[in-house]
Amino acid sequence: MLIRSSSANPILPSEITSCELFAARRDWLKSALAVGGVAALPGLAACSAEAQGVKLAGVKANPLYAIADEKLNKAEEFKSYCNFYEFGTDKADPPVMAKSLKTRPWTIAVEGEVLKPQVLDIDALYKLAPLEERVYRFRCVEAWSMVIPWVGFSLSELIKKVEPKGNAKYIEFVTLADKAQMPGLRSSVLDWPYVEGLRMDEAMHPLTMLTLGAFGEMLAPQNGAPVRMVIPWKYGFKSGKSIVKIRVVEKEPKTAWVKAGPGEYGFYSNVNPTVDHPRWSQGSERRIGEFSKRKTLMFNGYADQVASMYAGMDLRKFI
Ligand SMILES: Nc1nc2c(c(=O)[nH]1)N[C@H]1C(S)=C(S)[C@@H](COP(=O)(O)O)O[C@H]1N2
Ligand SMILES: [Mo]
């Protein structure tokens, strides 16, 4: 089991959440130190709390989701090898281009076929349910993978609160599309905003995680600050980053990747080593940091927990 001392250096996100506050501290530090040495201070380059690597307090490791015999990736690997097309299509773009993403104020609207629609402030989201650390395998369709200690809680905690109506069949995640902050939106590689979705039973599955942090810290901007999805048995692109809206809907959402390449991507996108992507064999994967390849597991190793949701479905057809 993974033991992580998250009570060391406990800073509540609500204590340091605004760019203004950072600016004020910076100015104070500058004058306190007078000229010299200011550039070496942490936290001067960027604006958002997340960019500073703020530690999360009160996070408990959930032993149900530990992975016994696979090593965690390094935080540096996770933070430097990223897919976040709003900040550029190269893996090295988001760590640089997302630095100044403004993550406060930030709200997340939960609406649609629900009895109690809500607009939640990001800091209220931190208090919605106890923060858990869960170690999940994460598999990108481009056949690389990592093992990440995520911090957050089951999405079902939030969905329960809005009370879906009887006709609620799917959930749609809409992520930030702000031209002023996201240079990647100038490209038409995807139809913005980046939209992803899940069937209701998938959304309510305990593994499906609303994620606020990783490696004991708030999510870095390039990893989807301030809030993203993580669905460990599906390809990485289902895990939308920097979410602003969750819609509960009746019909299967049109997702950004299905619109961009219906011949390459499907709505379900379950990790499946027996069905290849036209451009990447899905039978094996390269774990970032390892040299030789390893075999990809059905449902990314989560078959015991999730396979029953797809009983009777032809997974060659419903990709
Ligand atoms: N908004 C948004 N979310 C996104 C993406 C994106 O381009 N935009 N890329 C997806 C893809 S393809 C992957 S593999 C994961 C990568 O997450 P990571 O960079 O934090 O490892 O984010 C997913 N979420
Ligand atoms: Mo991906």
Image (tube, rainbow, N blue to C red):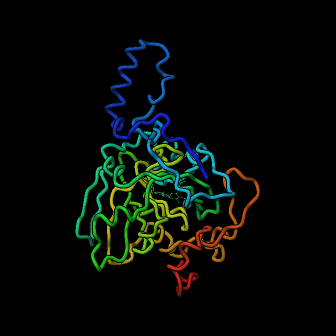
- Left or right of residue 16, residue 72 in this image: right
Does residue 23 lie above or below 280 as drawn?
above
Which quarter shows the C terminus?
bottom right
x, y percent for residue 2: 60, 50
**Residue 184 appears in view:** no
Q: Is residue 227 left or right of residue 21?
A: right
Q: Nearer the viewer, residue 293 or 10?
A: 10
Query: Which residue is painted at 45% across and 31% down in the image?
Result: 45
Snapshot quadrant of residue 64 = bottom right
Number of numbered discs overlaid on the protein picture: 0
Name the spot of residue 108 as percent of width and height, x first: 31, 55
Vertical placement of residue 282 versus 154, above or below: below
Q: Residue at x 59, y 57 (%)?
A: 66
Return the x and y of residue 104 as percentages of the image width and height.
Answer: 33, 43
Quadrant observed for ligand 2 in the rendered image: bottom right
Q: In the image as oriented, which residue stretches furthest toward the bottom?
A: 312
The residue under the point 23% across, 66% down is 116
Picture coordinates of residue 245, whole percent (x, y): 33, 60
Q: Is residue 4 visible?
A: yes
Residue drawn 33% across the image and 46% down it: 123
Question: As rendered, which of 98 and 108 lies closer to the eye?
Answer: 108
